[in-house]
């Protein structure tokens, strides 16, 4: 019996020498993995919370700036908070929103180069497909305003979405006007108007552009119904 116990002890020692440290290492690594995952989740939640707070502060600064364009402090806060979001929380949707807001502000203050820079930054972050398409249309507008018509055309060519067809056609009209091609502009604006009419949607700005090239909008259903009612009376 004693012999068997000694033999068992020796077997255990041998097993421990072979596998004991590996077992401990495996347990340690597994424990570290769980701890690391929990730490990563906590960091993600914390980052999103901080980013959301920064965005709220940025929106407040933007509202102050919009209410009073001469409010230099509001503009400074807007720029600072947006840059902080973009630099420290680039992986969050809040950073994309910040860049888009900076681009809009840059357009409103005629800083087209800055607007282009911010919009291209958004594209570099590889946001969702819908955001990419919308950003490309905005970038195309900025490039047209800058006179970089070739680059604007390249952006429009990358937008292949039936939902955005009216917008893209309208921007193509703007592009054609910049080239002094009023016939092409009229054709593009008419295409945009037909697409909107099919959805029974109106766009007042497009109607002004149509008038500028000698066209009138396609009647919408609501307008047709009103005319029919007047005729019946």
Image (cartoon, rainbow, N blue to C red):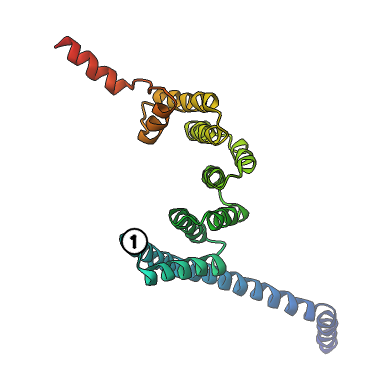
Measuring from the top left, give residue 33's x and y in whole percent. Answer: 65, 71
Residue 9 at x, y percent in the picture: 81, 86
| Residue at figure coordinates x 56%, y 48% from the top left | 146
Residue that protrudes farthest toward the top in the picture: 232
Residue furthest front as drawn: 180
Q: Nearer the viewer, residue 118 or 160?
A: 118
Closer to the camera in the image, 130 or 228: 228
Residue 160, above or below 232: below
The percent coordinates of residue 211 (x first, y second) are 39, 27
Task: Determine which quarter of the picture holds residue 91.
Answer: bottom right
172 sits to left or right of 194: right
Q: Going 51% across and 61% down the picture, which residue do you hit? A: 95
Determine which residue is flagged by label 1.
63
Secondary structure of the residue carrying numbered label 1? helix
Q: Is residue 27 left or right of residue 205?
A: right
Q: Quadrant of residue 215?
A: top left
């Amino acid at each position: 019996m004693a012999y068997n116990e000694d033999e068992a002890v020796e077997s255990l020692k041998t097993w421990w020498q072979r596998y004991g440290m590996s077992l401990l290492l495996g347990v340690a690594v597994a424990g570290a993995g769980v701890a690391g995952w929990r730490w990563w989740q906590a960091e993600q939640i914390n980052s999103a919370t901080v980013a959301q707070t920064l965005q709220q502060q940025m929106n407040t600064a933007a509202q102050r700036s919009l209410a009073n364009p001469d409010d230099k402090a509001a503009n400074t806060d807007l720029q600072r908070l947006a840059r902080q979001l973009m630099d420290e929380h680039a992986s969050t949707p809040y950073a994309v929103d910040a860049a888009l807001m900076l681009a809009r502000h840059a357009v409103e203050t005629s800083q087209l180069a800055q607007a282009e820079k911010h919009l291209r930054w958004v594209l570099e972050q590889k946001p969702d497909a819908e955001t990419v398409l919308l950003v490309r249309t905005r970038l195309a507008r900025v490039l047209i305003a800058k006179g970089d018509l070739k680059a604007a055309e390249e952006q429009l060519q990358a937008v292949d979405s039936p939902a955005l067809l009216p917008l893209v056609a309208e921007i193509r009209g703007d592009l054609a006007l910049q080239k002094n091609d009023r016939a092409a502009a009229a054709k593009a604006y008419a295409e945009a108007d037909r697409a909107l009419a099919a959805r029974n949607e109106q766009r007042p700005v497009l109607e002004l552009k149509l008038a500028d090239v000698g066209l009138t909008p396609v009647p919408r259903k609501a307008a047709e119904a009103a005319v029919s009612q007047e005729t019946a009376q």
